[in-house]
C-alpha cells in the first residue's frame, strides 16, 4: 500500500499496514529513528477501542494521556524504529516497572538504552529479588557480532553497564548481564519474559515451553559472566 508504515513481521501486530504510528518521548514529541520511546497511533482505525464501559474518563487518561498532548493513542508498548528501514520493533510493555533501592525503573527504558549502544542488536531486562535493594536488574543481551566469552565478555559487560549509567543514571546499571545468540521467543516473535525471570532467579524451568521457537537458548542464558 503506498504510503504505508512498514512493519517488522512478527514484531508488531498493528491492525493494517496503512496505520499512522510514531515513536515519541514522555512529552509526546517524536524522536529520531533509531531512538527508543513510546509507541503511539496518530490517527484512528476502524477496530480501535472507543471507550471503557462505565468509565469514559479512565479511557481518556489511559489511552489519550494529557502528558502526551491528549491527541495520540498510547499503545502501552515501548518501541524503536529502525534508522534505515523505518520498521518498528516492540521492546516491551511500558508498565513493566522494577523497584530498585526505592527507585522505580521501567524495563523498557533500560532495554532502549542498551539497544542504543552500537554493539547491541537486542535486549530484554527483568528483575530478581535482592535482599538489600528490593530488586536487582538482570539484562539479557544479543550482540550484533558473535556471542562473547571469557575476558571479552567481561569487557563488554563493563562497557554496557557504564553506557546505561551515562544514559539513565548509576541506579539503572544492570547487576547481571548475560549474552545469548538470541532470546527465547514464541514462533510469533514474542519474548517469553516469564522464562527470563525464572532464569534470573536460578529456578528450574518447569512450565510449558512447547510454544518456544528456540528452547535450546535457555541453557545458554543460564550462564552468568564471572
Image: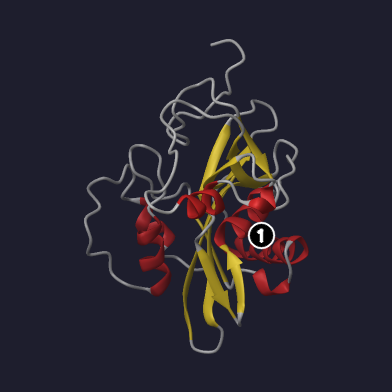
Answer with the quarter of the image where residue 225 lies: bottom right
100 above or below 188?
A: below
In the drawing, does residue 189 fall left or right of residue 6? left
Q: How is the image coloured?
A: secondary structure
Residue at left 66%, top 51%?
A: 66
Residue occupying the point 40% across, 74% down:
201
Judging depth in this view, the residue of 153 and 199 nearest the camera is 199
The answer to which image quadrant residue 24 occupies is top right
Q: Residue furthest right?
A: 166
Residue in the foreground of this view, choosing between 130 and 72: 72
As drawn, the residue found furthest toward the bottom would be 132
The reply, left or right, for residue 158 in relation to residue 178 is right
* x and y, in percent, of residue 192 in the image: 37, 53
> Which residue lies under the disc numbered 1?
156
Extreme-top residue of the structure:
2
Is 130 rendered above or below residue 35? below
Q: Residue at x 53, y 66 (%)?
A: 97
Q: Is any part of residue 180 visible from this angle?
A: no
Amino acid at each position: 500500500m503506498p504510503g504505508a508504515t512498514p512493519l517488522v513481521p512478527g514484531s508488531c501486530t498493528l491492525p493494517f499496514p496503512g496505520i499512522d504510528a510514531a515513536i515519541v518521548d514522555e512529552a509526546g514529541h517524536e524522536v529520531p529513528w533509531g531512538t527508543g520511546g513510546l509507541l503511539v497511533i496518530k490517527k484512528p482505525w476502524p477496530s480501535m477501542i472507543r471507550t471503557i464501559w462505565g468509565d469514559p474518563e479512565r479511557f481518556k487518561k489511559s489511552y489519550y494521556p494529557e502528558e502526551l498532548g491528549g491527541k495520540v493513542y498510547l499503545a502501552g508498548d515501548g518501541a524503536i524504529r529502525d534508522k534505515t528501514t523505518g520498521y518498528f520493533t516492540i521492546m516491551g510493555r511500558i508498565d513493566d516497572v522494577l523497584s530498585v533501592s526505592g527507585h522505580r525503573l521501567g524495563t523498557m527504558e533500560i532495554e532502549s538504552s542498551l539497544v542504543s549502544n552500537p554493539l547491541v542488536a537486542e535486549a530484554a531486562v527483568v528483575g530478581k529479588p535482592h535482599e538489600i535493594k528490593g530488586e536487582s536488574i538482570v539484562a539479557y543481551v544479543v550482540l550484533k557480532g558473535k556471542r562473547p566469552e571469557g575476558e571479552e565478555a567481561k569487557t563488554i559487560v563493563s562497557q554496557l553497564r557504564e553506557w546505561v549509567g551515562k544514559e539513565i543514571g548509576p541506579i539503572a546499571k544492570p547487576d547481571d548481564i548475560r549474552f545469548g545468540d538470541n532470546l527465547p521467543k514464541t514462533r510469533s516473535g514474542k519474548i517469553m519474559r516469564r522464562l527470563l525471570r525464572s532464569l534470573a532467579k536460578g529456578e528450574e524451568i518447569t512450565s510449558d515451553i512447547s510454544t518456544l521457537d528456540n528452547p535450546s537458548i535457555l541453557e545458554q542464558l543460564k550462564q552468568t559472566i564471572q
